[in-house]
Image (tube, helix red, strand yellow):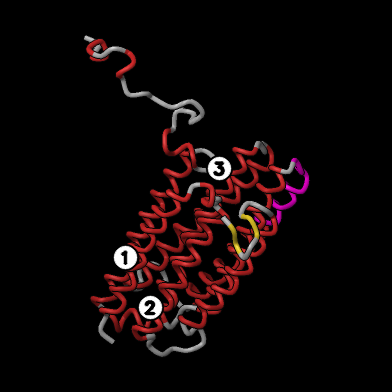
């Protein structure tokens, strides 16, 4: 597997993954409106859920080395999508 | 009676195929497969707890909104970056070991553990502020779940730092893959905890 043209499993790929994780963490802060107290609403909740899943998948693929086991990576990703989907569906159903 | 006597040897299902170390499909995973069973279990336990948290919020949204506004969201975001940076150095330690650079591998493990300690210190400061404001595990449902989930995670951070120390001493490639897999699981769980407890509203 490759990450921005760099083969997974190299030091360079790990650093690229870390940079992406930092950018996604900024994305989490933006989608979650870290500096405000306002309600998020379904669009920002959806964005927060997507960023959360992308971060988790990046950890699984590059940090945990599941690029070597794509079947297992799909299984873990599916589990995460179900779990995060349930959490954020409940959030969307919560009365304001 | 031995049931296997009913079948000629060539018809019996193989216990394992050559090269899989007896773990079947789990043998394709990096490190010791037992660690992956733990990772899957922890993911389900924390995932269940966070779904429970989201469910409790549906039942009492005002209490959760008021209590959540007392959390320090920027500090939570900072701690996410700290833990993910720690994860980078843990992963670099494994890569260095694969390249037979033992000293560099141990150095990376030390930096990973140091970032883990920073995470712990930030968390203790956060807890200290809550206790100083008279908030504890019995304050209300939100804070009971907050302290239980983040406290259980913090216990994993402490245990993870000890594991990083152990695999720095006994640093075979498999030990490093297994020990750092635990550490990345700690990352993974925090990546779920932070948005759900601190941000979801």
Residue A45 image point, x, y percent: 38, 79
Point out residue B21 in the picture as x, y percentages from the top left corner: 49, 29
Assign the C terminus of chain B to one quadrant of the image. bottom left
- Name the one closer to the observer, A69 or B173: A69
User: On what subunit does the disc labeled 2 rest?
Assistant: A
User: Picture quarter containing residue A87?
Assistant: bottom left
Which residue matches tag 2?
A46
Front residue of B114/A81: it is A81
What is the secondary structure assignment of the residue under circle 3? helix
**A35 displayed left or right of B106:** left
Disc 1 versus disc 3: nearer the observer: 3
At horizontal 65% and vertical 45% (from top left) the residue drawn is B165
- In which quarter of the view is residue B56 placed? bottom left
Query: Disc 3 marks which residue?
Result: B178
Q: Tell me the number on the disc at residue B19.
A: none
Cα separation between marks 1 and 3 = 28 Å
Residue bearing the label numbered 1: B51
Q: Have a look at marks 3 and 2 and say if they share a chain.
A: no
Q: Secondary structure at mark 1?
A: helix
Highlighted range, magenta: B100-113
Mark 3, other Cα within 10 Å: few <14 / some 14–19 / many ≥20: many
Residue A43, by quadrant, is bottom left
Q: Is residue B166 placed above or below B83 in the rendered structure? A: above
Residue B49 colored in magenta in the image = no
Q: Are marks 2 and 1 on the same chain?
A: no
**Can you give x and y, in whole percent of width and height, for residue A54 in the image?**
48, 67
Looking at the image, which residue is at 71% across and 53% down? B108
- Residue B153 is left or right of residue A81, and the answer is right
Task: Provide residue B163's location: percent of width, then percent of height.
Answer: 59, 45
Query: Which of pointers 1 and 3 lies earlier in the amino acid sequence?
Result: 1
Which marked residue is nearer to the observer: mark 2 or mark 1? 2
């Amino acid at each position: 597997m490759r990450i921005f043209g760099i083969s997974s499993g190299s030091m360079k790929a790990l650093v690229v993954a870390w940079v992406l994780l930092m950018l996604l963490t900024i994305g989490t802060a933006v989608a979650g409106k870290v500096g405000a107290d306002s309600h998020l609403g379904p669009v920002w909740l959806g964005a927060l859920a997507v960023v959360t899943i992308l971060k988790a998948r990046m950890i699984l693929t590059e940090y945990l080395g599941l690029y070597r086991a794509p079947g297992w990576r799909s299984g873990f990703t599916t589990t995460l999508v179900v779990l995060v989907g349930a959490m954020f569906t409940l959030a969307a159903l919560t009365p304001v | 009676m031995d049931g296997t006597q009913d079948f000629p040897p060539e018809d019996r299902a193989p216990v394992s195929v050559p090269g899989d170390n007896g773990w079947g499909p789990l043998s394709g995973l990096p490190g010791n497969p037992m660690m992956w069973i733990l990772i899957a279990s922890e993911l389900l336990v924390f995932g269940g707890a966070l779904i429970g948290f989201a469910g409790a919020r549906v039942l009492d949204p005002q209490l959760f909104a008021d209590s959540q506004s007392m959390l320090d969201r920027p500090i939570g975001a900072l701690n996410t970056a700290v833990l993910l940076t720690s994860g980078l150095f843990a992963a670099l330690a494994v890569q260095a070991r694969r390249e037979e650079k033992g000293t560099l591998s141990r150095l990376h493990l030390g930096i990973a553990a140091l970032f883990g300690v920073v995470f712990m210190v930030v968390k203790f400061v956060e807890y200290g502020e809550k206790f100083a404001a008279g908030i504890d595990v019995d304050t209300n449902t939100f804070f009971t779940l907050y302290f239980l989930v983040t406290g259980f995670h913090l216990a994993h951070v402490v245990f993870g730092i000890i594991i990083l120390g152990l695999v720095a001493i006994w640093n075979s490639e498999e030990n490093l893959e297994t020990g750092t897999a635990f550490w990345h699981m700690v990352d993974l769980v925090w990546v779920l905890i932070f948005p759900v407890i601190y941000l979801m509203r």
